[in-house]
Amino acid sequence: MHSQFDSFEMLSAVLVASCSFQALAGAAGTEKYEWAGIFPTPENYYMWTAQKVKGKYADPTMKLAVLPVTESTESQLDKIKSEGTHAMEKTCTNVAAGSTIVPKKDVCFTLQFDNDMWQSLFKVDAQNAQHLAFFAQHFPTEFEATAHYLKDDHGDDIEPKAELPHKEEATTKAATTHDDDKPWGAAIGASVLVNLVTLIGVIFLVPAFRKLAVDYANELNSIIGGFAGGALLSCAFFLLLFEATHLVATGWSEEVDVLWRWGTMILAGYLLPGLVDNATSLLVGSRTQDSSAAAEGADGDAQKVAADTGSGVTRARLIAGVLIGDFFHNLCDGIFMGAAFKGCGSSFGWGVALGTILHELPQEISDYVILTGPGVGFSPIIALVTNFASGLSVILGAVCILASDIDDSTTGLLLAFGGGVYLQIAATECMPRAFSDKISAKIRIAATGAFIIGAILIGLVLLDHEHCVPSTTSADGTVKPAGGHH
């Protein structure tokens, strides 16, 4: 019978599809500045910070105008837009890192970033201004790696009371520009590779493999289970769960708010398969009915049971468990992989893809055996074609996640949920095969070795894996690393 996980994924796919993914702001106006913000500045001095991101500044210099204003409100910022534009049109004064900026009207500064240092600091003299408006050539978040762009003399982050462009303007622009930054090629390519695994059953058309599978079924099942378990647990611990903590943290400031959401999504991914399997058993009958039927056959009515097993309701249950269950299984795999590529980059995405491929191998072998076995009776060609068709949903899942503008915290929750699912598959489905009582001690040792090999394959990804820094989307639709103030 097919894994309880397949029934669960039908529910999980519906839950994921029902989430409301918010569009991130992104637009650039026709003014001489990309961004403007207005701040209350009751302290005497503030610090403007620019940092290297991935080893370099977003731009070697940046034009900046700092205007004293009477209040820090949205209406005030709208009122002085023309003054900010006029100041940015002036010949700008070069300001080296470590220098002081004195806010003035009709004055433009060119911040000169120190390329020999990982960050450049500029002191802002606010002694004569209770409120300041900044007009910048670039979004200040482009220069954030670990620290917020504006801090007071106590080191606290100072957030703007209003910004330009406004959110409604930014959202319109984001809808037409943000898709350019999405890893469509890598995510779809990985999804195609996962779907090709559904054709693994073709190896059983070779007589030698077919004989090997029949004569050493338990041994192969144990070793493959250990291998898949190692790959999945490594993927869950090294990649999905660890990186999810950073992404989830972008949505909430309190540690307890981050922790309970992260933990709940992991437990949901792990626990719900069993709950859904129980519900399915109540609706269509438990697995023990098939075991009882087998016992009845052993008592002398084998021919009748064999006929019943390959017909009617039981045959429909087997087909639905494999094909419909696999459809939602692969849909969720596509969602997890798409979120990995989109939220954490290429190396992380391929690591998750590798874990997905490795755990698909034993599952698709099992699917082929069920479809061609006496319970269903499909020919090898029909089994391969139908299994391949149901697996196409992995591409659909990746497309759905890439086409949605989801924020970092939602991506983190999806990765945590996927980590919980992988824990469930590894611990409940794979590892019991590796330590089954039906196999010898030598085979269990071999299965342990296969577990280590599977874990190492995912671990090798870490050699080229950069830490997944949470990102922000600016008003020009560009994804940029977020600062530590999150």
Image (tube, helix red, strand yellow):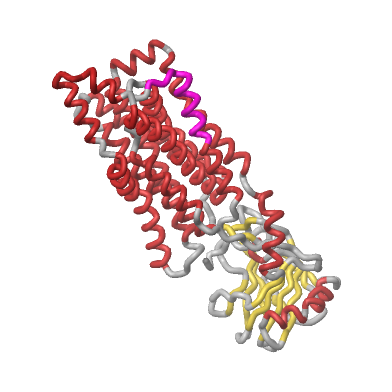
Q: Residue 342: where, in percent of width, then height?
A: 57, 49
Residue 129, picture quadrant: bottom right
Q: Residue at x 67, y 54 (%)?
A: 178
* Side (left or right) of 283 relative to 194: left
Outermost residue on the left side: it is 299
Residue 182, x across and y down, in percent = 63, 48
Task: Give the answer, above or below, for where 212 lies relative to 197.
Answer: above
Q: In this picture, is 1 found above or below 275?
A: above
Quarter residue 110 falls in: bottom right
Question: From the viewer's perspective, is residue 358 above or below residue 12?
Answer: above
Residue range corresponding to the magenta coloring: 377-392
Along the horizontal axis of the image, is 348 left or right of 166? left
| Along the line of sight, the residue nearer the viewer: 259 or 97 | 259
Q: Is residue 67 in sight in this rendering?
A: yes
- Look at the image and tell me in which quarter the N terminus lies: top left
**Viewer-nearest residue: 282 or 42:** 282
> Of helix, strand and loop, which mostly describes the magenta segment?
helix
Asked if one can make out residue 462 in the rendered structure from this viewpoint, the answer is no
Q: Residue at x 28, y 45 (%)?
A: 282
On whether residue 386 falls in the magenta region, the answer is yes
Residue lying at the far top of the rendered structure: 207
Q: Relative to the observer, which residue lies in front, 159 or 57?
A: 159
Percent from the top left, x then y, of residue 383? 45, 23
Numbered marks: total: 0
Seen at 46% across and 29% down, the residue is 387
The residue shown at (49%, 41%) is 331
- Direction from residue 353 to residue 422 in the image, left or right: left
